[in-house]
Amino acid sequence: MPKVVNHEQRRELLATTAGQLIAKQGVAKATVRNVARRAGVSTGTVSHYYSDSRELLFAAYQLAFRTSAARFVMAMENDSSFEGLLKAIANALPCDDITLSEWRVRMAFWGVSDYADDIQQFEQAAGSQFRQLISDRLKALAREKTIRLAVSPVHAARSIEGLLTGTAIQRLVSPGAESSAIAVKRLREQVRRGVLQE
């Protein structure tokens, strides 16, 4: 009886493997050969699922982004309060192996000219969805009168996105500068000061 292969799982495994290589060694080291070796498959298997290394590496980038976004959405759904929003934002920081790897993959592609247009389009669409989710939550909380906003929900969402990205980059370029707990506390305070009227 032939072995049943879940093609979607295999594609994701290869993209995950490529992401792990990118996070540890950079885009240049995540070759089809290295991904195949690390995943325990042949280069032909990789080529069956991805037409070339560019498609494979971009899939790794997208997967890192989508995985992070899915966790954020789940956290928002689990707690609809402002405290829940702060927790979801803080949990997106690179403070553990998983989030650190996701941010490293994202940053590895910034400035790689071969991917510039694709990355820009993808980040614009993902950023727009992220800001809309935050803006909608802030509007709902303001309507319920559980918070008072100092700025419009749209402006607040853009500010939160900038604070999160900036803090994440600081943690990546200076990993020992402050503990995860201090980074989270600082981010939460900055978000509060930036968007709430207290």
Image (spheres, helix red, strand yellow):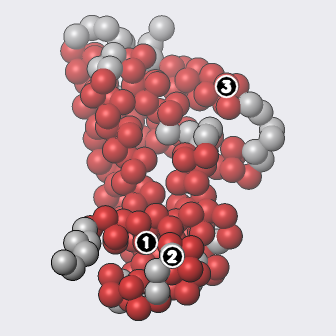
Residue 3 visible? The answer is yes
Report the residue at 28% width, 41% height from top: 132
Disc 1 crowd, CA 10 A, few/some/many (<14, 14-19, 20+): many
Please state the horizontal and vertical placement of residue 197, each as a whole percent of the image.
Answer: 44, 13
In the image, 43 versus 66, the foreground residue is 43
Disc 3 crowd, CA 10 A, few/some/many (<14, 14-19, 20+): few
Dot label at residue 40: 2
Residue 123 to residue 161: above or below: below
Alpha-carbon span between mark 2 and mark 1: 10 Å
In the image, 95 versus 121, the foreground residue is 95
Helix, strand, or loop for circle 1?
Answer: helix
Mark 1 vs 3, N-terminal side: 1
For badge 2, the amino acid type reads Gly
The residue singled out by tag 1 in the image is 14
Mark whose residue sits in front, 1 or 3: 1
Mark whose residue sits in front, 2 or 1: 2
Q: Are marks 3 and 2 in contact (CB under 8 Å)?
A: no
For badge 3, the amino acid type reads Ala
Please state the horizontal and vertical placement of residue 84, each as a whole percent of the image.
Answer: 39, 21
Dot label at residue 52: none
Helix, strand, or loop for circle 3?
Answer: helix
Q: Quadrant of residue 29?
A: bottom right
Helix, strand, or loop for circle 2?
Answer: loop
In the image, 195 versus 189, the foreground residue is 189
Residue furthest right as drawn: 177
Dot label at residue 181: 3
Residue furthest front as drawn: 1
Using residue 99 as the reference point, say whether residue 80 is left or right of it. Answer: left
Residue 198 to residue 165: above or below: above
Question: Which quadrant does the N terminus fall into?
Answer: bottom left
Q: Quadrant of residue 27?
A: bottom right
